[in-house]
Image (tube, rainbow, N blue to C red):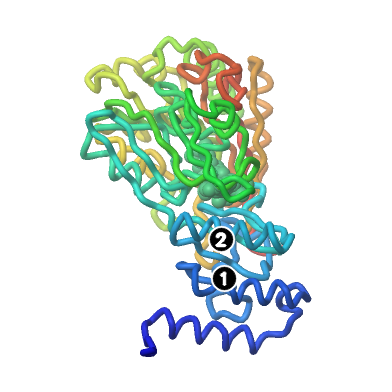
Amino acid sequence: MALSYSTRNKRNAAFIETCNAMSVDDFGGSHEVRDAILALRPFFQGEIIFPSNKDYDADRMLSNPVFQFHPIVILYCKTEVDAALALGLCRDQGLPFSVRSGGHCTAGFSGNNGVMIDVKNLNGILIDEDAKTAVCGTGVEFGDFQQALDPYHLNVPGGECADVCVGGYVQGGGFGFTAAKYGISCDNVIEVRVLLADGTVAVSNKDKNPELLWAVCGGTGGNFGILLTVKFQLHDLDKCYGFALDWALDTDQEVEQAAQALCYLQNDYMLNSVAGPDLTLQLHIGFQYVDDSKTKMKPFLMVRGLWAGDVGQGPDVIAPLKALPGMLRDHFWEAVDTFYVMNHKLLHYPQGMPPMPPGPDPLEDKSSHYVTRDLALGEWQQMLGFMKTSLPNKSFAYMEVYGGAIAERDRLSNAFVHRDAAFNLILDVFWKDD
Ligand SMILES: Cc1cc2nc3c(=O)[nH]c(=O)nc-3n(C[C@H](O)[C@H](O)[C@H](O)COP(=O)(O)OP(=O)(O)OC[C@H]3O[C@@H](n4cnc5c(N)ncnc54)[C@H](O)[C@@H]3O)c2cc1C
């Protein structure tokens, strides 16, 4: 029989060499695990990364370096069969594992010290323009997805941050700048394919295995199997209107004006918004540079939003907000653009997240809470006053405003039950060293 010198055969030979050079302790002390991983190699199409691999330290990281996991192996699935092989390995060897799409889980649930099954390469996007649907692999990044949808003038709520992935995002709900109009992202999921623990693939839609679709949509990631693909119902969206309004928070009077603006927003632009579901808002309390040399920072309340109705009406819709006392006229920003471009601009114009000093990625801690009741003026003032005491470029708070289509949907229509929230309040803290 002729010997094949294909790249894969060379790769397999190199892999066996690597495994032979490793101690059995590197495989959790088990010869069986070592043999099972060796047996997997010829059939597994993706990369297999061990701690001895030069890329291991970068590959084991989640988006937030505060989480430090040291998996015995990282399996980068290139195909869905790879995912089944990876899951089979964990099942047969009784190995703990986690599934990672984008690695953005703020609780670190996509990492562990056993097997890390990474599905970021399951990242195909298939758009059906006529049916207005899209099927995505769960490794699809929202930046890529929204860019692909833009030429078709179609939209579905997606992660504001471009590298958040479909896999973790839709299973947690998923807020984006069109969520008030189209609902939380998982409300737009019409079919999923899930690799179950026994290695079979379950298709779930409203007619077939509907309870699995119900649970995956908002039931949080990593609970029901490996999510392989997600089919979204898309919506027409051409140009949209975006804006940003700022209030200074220096003096007591400015804090009071900002707190009054928040009361006004709460009454008229959150649950039962006078603007209707076409307006999605995000509010920020944090520090920004106020000089060109970037040495001086001051605290601001920033209100940004996207109007997904008739763009010509956008300025009228926000006119009452612009007229509120304390709104900084020279900070006002507005633009009309496609959704993909506008989503980027809304995160970076006129200001983005509190700027961090250059260097390695900061460590981060985040805490979020759904707020369902009205806050009194004094409570808003207290919140603004508290944020002013935080370290300038190390923390901020933001609110994703719900209402609209999120609130309209029946509370038990899927596992995302937070329908009565006026907003999701998120506190974010960064640091460079202990
Ligand atoms: C910088 C940043 C920006 C963010 N922006 C937004 C935002 O705009 N809107 C918003 O709603 N949220 C946002 N989030 C939160 C984000 O939605 C969640 O962290 C989400 O889980 C990220 O998805 P992921 O695939 O990147 O995460 P991962 O960390 O890969 O996964 C999250 C969870 O899902 C599981 N999981 C992942 N893939 C699969 C799969 N294929 N099958 C089964 N389980 C799986 C993981 O095991 C883990 O439990 C943001 C987070 C960060 C860090």
Q: Do tag 2 and tag 1 residues touch (Cβ < 8 Å)?
A: yes
Q: Look at the image and tell me in which quarter the C terminus lies.
A: bottom right
Q: Nearer the viewer, residue 77 or 35?
A: 35
Secondary-structure class at tag 1: helix
Q: In terms of sequence position, does the residue under pointer 2 or pointer 1 come before the other?
A: 1
Q: Nearer the viewer, residue 135 or 241?
A: 135
Q: Is residue 160 left or right of residue 149?
A: right
Tally the marks: 2
Q: Is residue 149 left or right of residue 139?
A: left
Mark 1 is on which residue type? Leu
Q: Is residue 341 above or below residue 336?
A: below
**Separation of marks 2 and 1 at Cα, in angstroms:** 7 Å
Q: Quadrant of residue 306?
A: top left
Q: Nearer the viewer, residue 124 or 54?
A: 124
Return the residue found at the far right.
Answer: 29
Residue 93 at x, y percent in the picture: 72, 63
Mark 2 is on which residue type? Leu
Residue 379 at x, y percent in the picture: 68, 22
Q: Which mark is residue 40?
A: 1
